[in-house]
Image (spheres, rainbow, N blue to C red):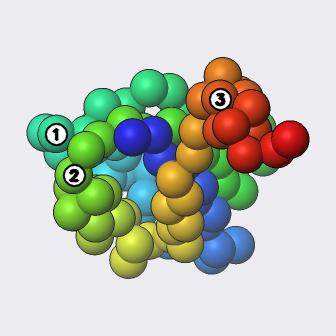
């Protein structure tokens, strides 16, 4: 299943600097069992989002724990348009 993880840094520059330092040291990669499909960061560095795929939501909690002390995170399950079309085709008459 795919999940959209959005992240936002507080305007506190020390916290943002700590997040950047951690990212450079760790690579910002999710734990084993979670596939990073893409990551995009806003050009003003205020936040961004990751597209992740996993069958184990506990792994997403593990990933969130690695970063939630430095930024606000939201993780939302998502589906692609093709999958949505299949659902709509069955349900909407």
Residue bearing mark 1:
33
The answer to whether residue 46 is above or below residue 28 is below
Q: Farthest residue in the right direction?
A: 93
| Residue 53 locus on image (x, y percent) | 37, 36
**Circle 3 crowding by C-alpha within 10 Å: few under 14, some 14–19, many from 20:** few
Residue bearing mark 2:
56
Residue at point 55% right, 58% down?
76
Q: Nearest the camera: 57 or 9?
A: 57
Q: Secondary structure at mark 2?
A: loop
| Residue 70 locus on image (x, y percent) | 44, 71
Asked if labels 2 and 1 touch by Cβ distance under 8 angstroms, the answer is: yes
| Residue 42 locus on image (x, y percent) | 73, 42
Left or right: where does residue 44 sit relative to residue 58?
right
Number of the front mark, 1 or 2: 2
User: Where is the N terminus found, in terms of image quarters?
Assistant: top left
| Res. 84 in view | no
Q: Quadrant of residue 29?
A: top left
Q: Which mark is residue 86?
A: 3
Residue at point 74% right, 32% down?
89
Q: Which mark is residue 8?
A: none
Number of the front mark, 3 or 2: 3
Per the model, the C-alpha gap separating discs 1 and 3 is: 27 Å
The answer to whether residue 29 is above or below residue 21 is above
Per the model, the C-alpha gap separating discs 1 and 2 is: 7 Å
């Amino acid at each position: 299943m795919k999940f959209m993880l959005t992240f936002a840094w507080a305007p506190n520059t020390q916290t943002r600097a700590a997040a950047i330092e951690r990212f450079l040291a760790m690579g910002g990669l999710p734990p084993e069992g979670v596939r990073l499909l893409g990551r995009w960061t806003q050009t003003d560095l205020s936040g961004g989002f990751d597209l992740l795929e996993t069958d184990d939501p506990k792994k997403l909690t593990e990933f969130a724990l690695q970063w939630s002390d430095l930024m606000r995170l939201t993780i939302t399950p998502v589906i692609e348009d093709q999958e949505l079309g299949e659902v709509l085709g069955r349900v909407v008459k």
